[in-house]
Image (cartoon, grey):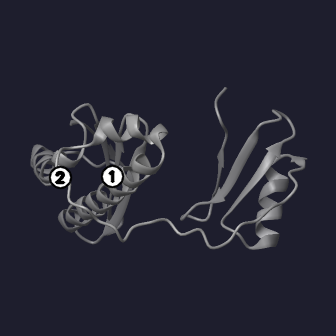
Amino acid sequence: MRFSFIGKNNVTVTEALKEKITDKLGRIEKLFPADSKATVTLSVIKLSHTIEVTVTLPKRTLRAEVTKDDMYAAIDEVTDILENQMVKYKSRLRDKSRRDKTFADEYQAIALPEEPSDDGNEINITKEKHFILKPMDPEEAVMEMELLDHSFFVFKNAKTEMFNVVYKRKDGAYGLIEPEE
């Protein structure tokens, strides 16, 4: 696994921090393919230490973010989150590849021999919604999202004629997801 480190808000990524993160993530490195890349972003705002780790896999991206009073505690927790995500992802992908051969290639790209079975992680979709997508601008979509009291909203962008998503971020701001052509 290749690592890249980014320090935000005047955070200097010291060799001790790099070594601690590399050691901790090295503990779960065996779960990831050899060609995966981990981007680690460290930031401090007042007394809150935040670590965000994004791991790029051949066809997927895993992300975990933790904010704690202590950076080393945040590193421990983000490692546990990534480990749980990867185990769950592999388990689901293994089950899908058994039922549908289109997932077999993706599973083979990340699979390790003799993985333990974890049969309690099947996705259970309990509700479906159907609605008509009308063209609108992102500001109108945010207003619609707020009226519905949702945390995200799918809409057709009037300018690009593409499907977009607006969402409410943890900091109270809004985000826009636009597909690339």
Quarter in which the C terminus is drawn: top right
Q: Distance between the residues labelled 2 and 1?
A: 13 Å
Residue 129's label in the rendered image is: none
Kind of residue sitting beneath label 2: Ile
Q: Which residue lies under the disc numbered 2?
A: 28
Which of the 4 quarters of the picture holds residue 46?
A: bottom left
Position of residue 106 measured from the top left corner of the image (x, y, whole percent):
39, 37
Q: Using the rendered image of the protein, determine whether residue 6 is visible from the camera's viewpoint.
A: no
The image shows residue 144, relative to residue 147, as above or below, that is: above
Residue reaching furthest to the top: 181
Q: Residue at x 39, y 39 (%)?
A: 104
Q: Which residue is drawn at 90% across and 49% down?
A: 134
In the picture of the structure, the residue carrying the numbered disc 1 is 90
For the residue pair 77 and 116, the one nearer the viewer reads as 116
The answer to which of 22 and 68 lies nearer the viewer is 22
Name the foreground residue: 75 vs 61: 61
The three-letter code of the residue at mark 1 reads: Lys
Is 45 on the left or on the right of 165, as rendered?
A: left
